[in-house]
Image (cartoon, rainbow, N blue to C red):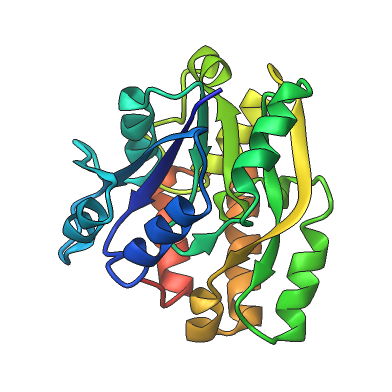
Amino acid sequence: MLVSIIIPTYNEAENIAQLIGYLKNNSNDLLLEIIVSDGGSGDNTLALAEQEGAIALNSPEKGRAAQMNYGASVAKGDLLYFVHADTIPPQSYLADITQAVSKGYAMGRYLSSYDSKSWLLKLNAFLSRLDTFAGMGGDQTLFITKKLFKQTGGFDGGMKIMEEFEFCARARNQGKYKIIHKPVLISARKYDSNGWLKVQRANYTVVRMYQKGASQQDLAATYKKMLNYR
């Protein structure tokens, strides 16, 4: 089973070379390709990605969902692994996800950890052990067989926020889901810029709005208004 890694990016020059280098240094014959699907970065994200040996693509549409769909559309692997540019998976990532699939799981994620000593973020990390709606975001990375990805129709390309939550909830109706009990390392930059309470309040507000059927425009505008983040 060959793996295609897909990384959606937007102005990630600070992180992308390090991530690609790490993924390659901890790879084996199972890694077929690393695809960077960019949403129109104004920095040299794509140039750095290409220098590191990744397939660097300009997505026709901006937005994480559309960019991940575009990356998946050109991926040649049997297993798709979606990774955020500011997240570092365990060194054993290839063995972990391919082993999970060999045991009958069609999709899944890792646990969280953060590059911060904050005890509040340690609490967030602990809660990622629970199989809840809050744990289905993309920070924990997501692996899924190409077969199941195609069956679901992929991410909802019209979504600008909450796209990974929506996708996982939908895809889990068609495939067995695995939580791998190892942590990925997630950048705490959003919390550093805003504070833990402010981020939690924004997350809670947007999730509640989403569950009540708010539009994507209202969700994105509310999140942007509540947080100073990228």
Q: Is residue 14 left or right of residue 92?
A: left
- In front: 23, or 7? 23
Residue 219 visible in image: no
Residue shown at 17%/64% (left/top)? 44
The residue at the far front in this view is 29
Q: Is residue 145 visible?
A: yes
Please tell me how many numbered marks the rendered image carries: 0
Camera-side residue: 216 or 120? Answer: 120
Q: Is residue 218 left or right of residue 93?
A: left
- Residue plotted at (69% across, 50% down): 110
Residue 98 percent location from the top left of the image: 65, 31
The location of residue 6, given as percent across then percent down, is 41, 41
At x 60%, y 41%, the residue is 94
Quarter of the figure with the C terminus? bottom left
The image quarter in which residue 58 lies: top left
Q: 217 left or right of 126? A: left
> Where on the picture, by quarter, is residue 228?
bottom left
Residue 178 position (above or below residue 219): above
Q: Position of residue 193 (x, y in %)?
A: 47, 84
Picture quadrant of residue 85: bottom left
Quarter holding the N terminus is top right
Could you say which is closer to the camera, residue 133 or residue 86? 86
User: Horizontal and vertical percent for residue 38?
Assistant: 26, 48
The residue drawn where x is 46% and y is 74% is: 227
Residue 123 in the figure: left or right of residue 78: right
Q: Tell which of 130 and 208 is nearer to you.
A: 130
